[in-house]
Amino acid sequence: MTTINLVIFGIGNVGSTLINQIADLKPKLIKNQEINLKIPVITNSKLAFFTDDTDHNWKADFEQFSVPYKIEDILNYVKTKKFQNLIAIDVTASTEFVHNYNTLIASGFHIISANKVANTLDFEFYNTLRQTLKKYDKKYLYETNVGAGLPVIETVKNLHNSGEDITKIRGVFSGSLSYIFNRFSAEEEAFSNILNAAAKEGLTEPDSRDDLSGKDVARKLLILARELGLKPELSDVKIETLVPKRLNGKTTLKQFKHRVTELNPVFEKSKRAQKPESVLRYVGELNTKNNTLEVKLVSEPKASPLGQLKGADTLFELYTESYVNQPLVIQGAGAGKAVTARGVLSDILKIASQLH
């Protein structure tokens, strides 16, 4: 039996779902794979709950027994308890927390992250992190950074490492924007109504301008570019934002929600200007031949893979020397706490099997 000790940072939608998925899967893993996943520490941004292991009652325990903490408290706790096979799971959205990665790695932790920040900071930070991993012989997995539960990063890595020349990656990278434009293209419904429906279903960020700004798609594009050995910065990504200047950050969220119908004529015009049998899609595109990274609204033929997207699915087209005219397509659910948590769990099991 191999015991893996997980320290989970973040108990929002994804973190909470992940803890429950682990509790459900635990008996099967012990029986079939002789792997025992234990969770001795759970934290939110301010409090930590310390135990020997966690079960389905973790929420009540956290409420009753959690205490204020610093990262040093966690390092001291796992050291005192002599825990082996440590994995730190970052399911926060925190910019600050990623600056703990190097300390955690030096203290014996592997890292798994659903948080995109570490891979989209300046290239110097990106590079230093990888040097630390090499120095301490630790793993860092982040499959959910780009395609939620889809194996996008793994596929890109495998192709690149096997010498396959990836010339272009193109697709709809955002589940929320996929949902919005799939519906807007297919229905005679106002853009603002569809945007509000996406927010109600929990597909968008609390401020939907965070989705419409294109920054999330840009971050995913940057991560993929760096997987190919390129060294771009976030500022190198050319972004066509979907938020008009008059409705951007200077307008409060309350004001934006009140004025959201101002978006309708803008997108209606784009919809009407298309060729027949075409649909609008918000895409990310990386071209390695001319080193361009773009996020933009385009018109696609209805019959194309991108044109046939439904629901909140994401789709990634990989063009390589072997897949020149017909790209390799990866498609599936691109948003949602359950698929993202399952993707993180899949990364945990990849490391666990190597430690087993």
Image: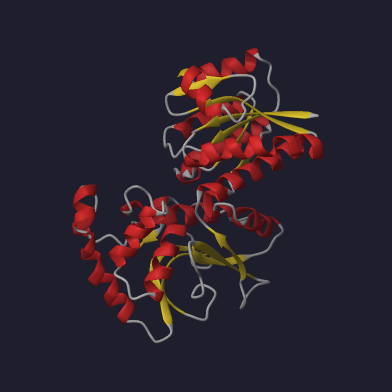
The answer to whether residue 284 is left or right of residue 240 is: right
Q: Which residue in the rendered view is the most extreme toward the top? A: 80
Nearer to the camera, 97 or 6: 6
Q: Who is closer to the viewer here, 153 or 52?
A: 52
Please give the name of the residue rendered at 47% of the width and 23% of the height, measured from the top-left corner. Answer: 63
Between 353 and 219, the one lying in front of the other is 353
Q: Quadrant of residue 275?
A: bottom left
Q: Is residue 151 visible?
A: yes
How many numbered marks, from 0 up? 0
Q: Position of residue 222 (x, y in %)?
A: 48, 54
Residue at the spot 65% in from the left edge and 71% down from the top edge: 321
Residue at 33%, 77% (x, y): give it.
271
Asked whether residue 174 appears in the rendered view, the answer is no
Q: Is residue 26 left or right of residue 175?
A: right
Examine the rendered structure and indicate whether residue 329 appears above or below residue 196: below
Tell me the colour scheme of the image.
secondary structure
Taking the spot 22% from the left edge, 54% from the top edge, the residue there is 256
The spot of residue 172 in percent (x, y) is: 48, 64
Q: Quadrant of the N terminus?
A: top right
Please say if 304 is above or below 173.
below
Residue 320 image offset from top left, x and y in percent: 63, 69
Q: Position of residue 318 (x, y in %)?
A: 59, 66
Which quadrant would the C terminus be assigned to in this image? top right
